[in-house]
Amino acid sequence: MAFTLMLEIRGTQGRHAEAPATLPAVSDPLDALERRIGELRGEVRRAVKARQSTLARSLRGELRKAELAWDDAVSAEHGDAPEPAGTPSLLPVREQVHQALALLGVPTAARLVVAVHEAFFAGGLSAGRLTSLRRDEERSFRTAPFSRPYYLCAALTDRLSPARGLLAVSTWPLEQRIVGPLSHRVDFLVSASRIAEHLGRLTRAGEDAPPGALRLLSRMAQNIPGAVERFGGAEPQTVIRAAAAELTVHLEADTAGRAGTAERAARQLGDVEQLFGAATLSHAQRGA
């Protein structure tokens, strides 16, 4: 048997036509998926190199779908039972969020918190349940300061206001909860490294790496130069090395900026504002 693929043939003048090409039939759907994943990785790399951001974004979406289809096919082939969706956790929402933030170690947006929790921990956690969480934590702290072992608090900008959409942990040093101009990239690289390190710990302990965590790491690795080798998924050690290489470019300046802002915050803000941010810019302007 054979099947026909329509191959796009591009001319030197930008013209293109479609011509049939006959290939041997693929007996194993996994072979076809793995071939397609390899092709898509190459196309993404070429689109990024050519600075075709719209095309690269579209190709990454196709790549994610192909990777998910591959995971489903592998599970079906080996008779793995899918994990039940939405399995309730025995932990309160704030403790589930704390689990994810403790793994990442940097101020993090709700969507990544949910993705990390789903990848590594039992139980479902939805971004919608995090919407009012920081306000509830602030209300609790104002009512009874320091009565809990930790609070889920805000990251602070260089203006000492709360950073929109980012969650942090009160027990972190103040400079760790500051975000400056370079911090988003630095924290992304640190997050990828921490996820890769946790996967490494699991495999060294003889546990299977969660498929969802591998998918998450692979998606993040697509945005780190040199983090993905060949056509396979991301390897934790490769991601760690690639992230460390880029961190050498940004980390020193980011650390210095955070330290300076943290000193100013400690000097100008009270306990509540150090955790949840200044309500106005007056704190940032005072004593500057």
Image (cartoon, rainbow, N blue to C red):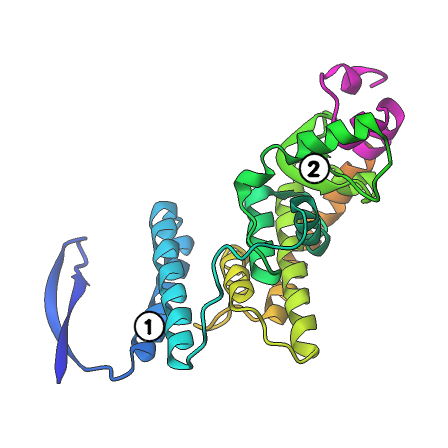
Secondary structure type for disc 2: loop
Q: Which residues are magenta?
A: 261-288
The residue closer to the viewer here, 13 or 2, is: 2
Secondary structure type for disc 1: helix
Horizontal and vertical percent position of residue 65: 36, 60
Q: Amino acid at mark 1?
A: Leu
Which quarter shows the N terminus? bottom left
Give neighbour class at mark 2: few <14, some 14-19, many 20+ (Cα, 10 Å). many
Residue 273, quarter of picture: top right
Horizontal and vertical percent position of residue 193: 66, 60
Residue 131, quarter of picture: top right
Magenta region includes residue 243: no
Q: Is residue 187 above or below residue 258?
A: below
Which quarter shows the C terminus? top right
Please give the label number shown on residue 33.
1
The residue closer to the viewer here, 231 or 135, is: 135
- Judged left or right of residue 154, residue 18 is left
Q: Amino acid at mark 2?
A: Val
